[in-house]
Image (tube, grey):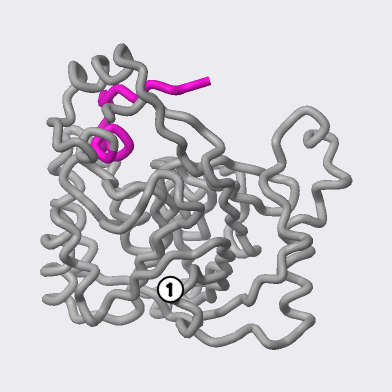
Amino acid sequence: MPLGVIPAGTGNGMAKSLMASVEDPCVAANAIFAVIRGHKQPLDVATISQGKTRFFSVLMLAWGLIADIDIESEIYRWMGSVRIDFYGILRIMCLRKYNGCIYFVPAPGHEAVGDPVDNNDVSNNLLRSMHGDHDNDPRTESGYPGPSVASQNWAWRTIGGPFISVWLHNVPWATEDTMPAPAAKFSDGYLDLILVKDCPRAALVAMLTKMKDGGHVKSEHVLYIKVKAFCLEPGQRVAEPEKGGIIDSDGEVLARGEGTFKCNQNDIMAYGPPIHITIHQGLATLFSPN
């Protein structure tokens, strides 16, 4: 069933990505006309899993700086979209770094990034934790469990922290004026990883201003690659080991650690255990302007 996307939110990243593909303004009228015309566009869908818990994402997943800005700036919602820029500056002034580790299956051309996961036990544990619960989960009888990776002979890579920001994106635009993933495609079967491990504050501010046109990916402080599968093992803040972080997907909190914004709420996933992401190429269909 094709889905029509109408820009009516704070960021409107999906609608902007669709309209920008034909250089149309991101306004409701143009989006409605795209639905009426009836052109269709396949869209990749990411399955985010932790044990038997599943979450389906079409836009992004963030941990670190971007997630903190997105979620914690809610207290300034009265400011409108300016809250993102305002809180971004505040967050950079009091910059956080997070311990942790990421594992990923790189797209062709990026096989040399990171370190190889050459321990068979580690590789097998990754695979088991990504698909091992499907067979015993009664919800998979009537629900979609995500793509199976059991038979995939993937070469996993890893990068250790600390991290300033880990950001995965499915389409080019995150908001109407922020393009974190300029090389992202709607249905290429990959997520774009934007990773920042270490960066001076002044360079970080400059990078954020360049996100309006995707120029930040040229920074020496940014690692920008495509990945087929991903695993996040989030850790605690470097300078505040009693506090964790926030994991944000499509603007919703998946998990948050101790000492974070509204950490007393019950989120759908736990902070700390690995969170896995796999991609189903072209699973969804959107009405598109072209």
3 within the magenta span: yes
The residue lying furthest to the right in this view is: 136
Q: Where's residue 275, x and y in %?
A: 61, 59
Residue at the image point whose x is 62% and y is 58% from the top = 276
Depicted 10 relative to depicted 175: above or below: above
Measured along the vertical axis of the image, is residue 225 above or below residue 55?
A: below
Of residues 159 and 38, the one nearer the viewer is: 38
Give the magenta range. Answer: 1-17
Residue 76 at what x, y percent from top left?
21, 41
User: Residue placed at 18% from the left, 72% from the top?
Assistant: 204
Q: In this rendering, is residue 256 above or below 140?
A: below
Q: Which residue is mark 1?
A: 98
Q: What residue is rendered at 20% in x and 73% in y?
A: 218
Towards the viewer: 2 or 145: 2
Q: Quadrant of residue 151?
A: bottom right
The residue lying at 47 percent from left, 30 percent from top is 285
Q: What kind of secondary structure does the magenta stretch mostly adopt? A: loop
Q: How many marks?
A: 1
Q: Is residue 214 left or right of residue 236?
A: left
Q: Nearer the viewer, residue 43 or 7?
A: 43
Mark 1: secondary structure: strand
Amino acid under disc 1: Tyr
- Left or right: 160 in relation to 18: right
Q: Quadrant of residue 14?
A: top left
The spot of residue 113 in percent (x, y) is 45, 82
Quadrant (top left, top right, bottom left, bottom right) of the C terminus = top left
Mark 1, Cα crowd under 10 Å, few <14 / some 14-19 / many 20+, is many
Q: Is residue 234 left or right of residue 177?
A: right
In the image, residue 170 sits, relative to residue 3, either above or below, namely below
Q: Position of residue 208 (x, y in %)?
A: 17, 62
